[in-house]
Image (cartoon, rainbow, N blue to C red):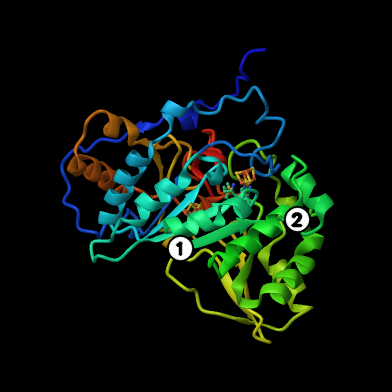
Amino acid sequence: MGERVIPLTDWRRAHVASPATMVPVTGLLSDALGRPLRDLRISVTDRCNFRCSYCMPKEVFDKRYAFLPHEQLLSFEEITRLAGLFAAHGVRKLRLTGGEPLLRKHLEILVEMLSALRTPDGDPLDLTLTTNGSLLARKARSLRAAGLKRLTVSLDALDDAIFQRMNDVGFPVGEVLAGIDAALDAGFGPIKVNMVVKRGVNDHEIIPMARHFRDRYGAQAVLRFIEFMDVGATNGWRMDDVVPSAEVLRRLQAQWPLAALEASAPGETAERWAYADGRGEVGLISSVTQAFCHDCNRARLSTEGQLFLCLFGSRGHDLRSLLRGGANDAEIASAIAHVWTARDDRYSELRGSGHAAGQGERKVEMHYIGG
Ligand code: SAM
Ligand code: SF4
Ligand code: SF4
């Protein structure tokens, strides 16, 4: 049987990034809406061993789906070179993601290379990784030893049957929980745990999840509830499936008194709430009901080296052809500066208005540019 043909052309047909005129690197880039560039999310693979229906539904991402061949992926050297140029432009935080980043072979080597990078002030970057936790029990120690600073683990339910249904490959929840324990033993606390909430699927797991993480780990685990988003074009998103953060908060407050906390950094996506009895905090990420585009300082580098300016973008800007075409650092840095300076994306703010960037074009899939 031939490869499945699905219309991926919009987001796999990138704009050509070009240095145009040379721009000096000042570390003070700002986009068309005055937003700085601080956070770079790097997708190290488009493959995953889970098939979460909200991200890589099994019916689409099956045996016939054409994942990228290895030579199309950025190499560790290419990723590190680009990350260094982004750091020179003001990026302070790097997040490795995917697909499932722990499926990329020898990822510890990349972590080691990235942990050697410095900001223009000589500080190390905040290096973090988001994983489904399936391989964490095996890899937590080596990632820590390689210089990874922080971890986010995605977990949508404690109930094994619900979790297995959500990852859709029958992966047992016990192994992810063991991965979280291993990561804490390896020195990764506090760990963030991300739960995507879908109405009627796992919303009755909100309270059991909160209870488990506060009772067992206190401040060492921060559970964050994420509204199910309309990323990509394959997850069958409907507003009816979204449980608004305000409702999640009401349900939590019916169990425990909570007090609002200040955001930990500008551009922080989660609204933070502390348990009044001191057993740590929870986060609410309201990507649908409360847009946070006004201070969005995140850029995304796809598995094959395209720069995306918004999670809901439909086209990237091809940096790989510059890397492989022999451009020097100043030229690539200029190309990045041109792309960022022109950025005016704010999809979540415009959602539903009919004016969102690239509307009518097919949006990029999340596993390709990471969350
Ligand atoms: N495979 C890794 C994982 O699951 O943690 C990293 C990549 S995954 C695309 C990054 C994050 O995006 C996960 O926390 C996942 O739950 C979240 N995500 C994926 N699709 C989503 C959607 N439609 N709405 C909200 N969050 C989503
Ligand atoms: Fe894989 Fe993460 Fe997407 Fe689930 S959310 S399918 S674990 S990439
Ligand atoms: Fe940033 Fe785009 Fe999300 Fe708005 S919709 S917060 S611009 S990634």
Q: Residue reaching furthest bottom?
A: 277
| Residue 356 in the image: above or below residue 159 | above
- What is the count of numbered marks? 2
Whether disc 1's CB lies below 8 Å from ligand 1 is answered: no
Q: Position of residue 27 (x, y in %)?
A: 24, 59
Q: Name the one closer to the observer, 146 or 318.
A: 146
Q: Residue at x 55, y 64 (%)?
A: 186
Residue 161 lies left or right of residue 122; in this view the side is: right
Categorize mark 1 by other alpha carbons within 10 Å: few (<14), some (14-19), many (20+): some
Q: Residue lying farthest top?
A: 1
Residue 225 appears in the figure = no
Residue 73: where, in percent of width, then height?
A: 43, 33
Identify residue type, mark 1. Lys
Which residue in the structure is indicated by mark 1?
149
How crowded pointer 2 is (Cα within 10 Å; few <14, some 14-19, many 20+) is rated as some
Against 218, is 308 above or below? above
* Residue at point 36%, 56% (across, down): 115
Q: Position of residue 369 (x, y in %)?
A: 49, 42
Label 1 element class: loop
Question: Would you name the residue on which mark 2 appears?
Answer: 174
Q: Looking at the image, can residue 160 be seen?
A: yes
Q: Position of residue 158 (x, y in %)?
A: 77, 59
Disc 2 is placed on an element classified as helix
Q: How far is mark 1 from mark 2, CA to CA?
A: 24 Å
Label 1 or label 2, whichever comes before in sequence order: 1
In the shown orientation, is residue 2 left or right of residue 254?
A: left
For residue 235, which quarter of the picture? Answer: top right
Residue type marked 2: Gly
Q: Which mark is residue 23?
A: none
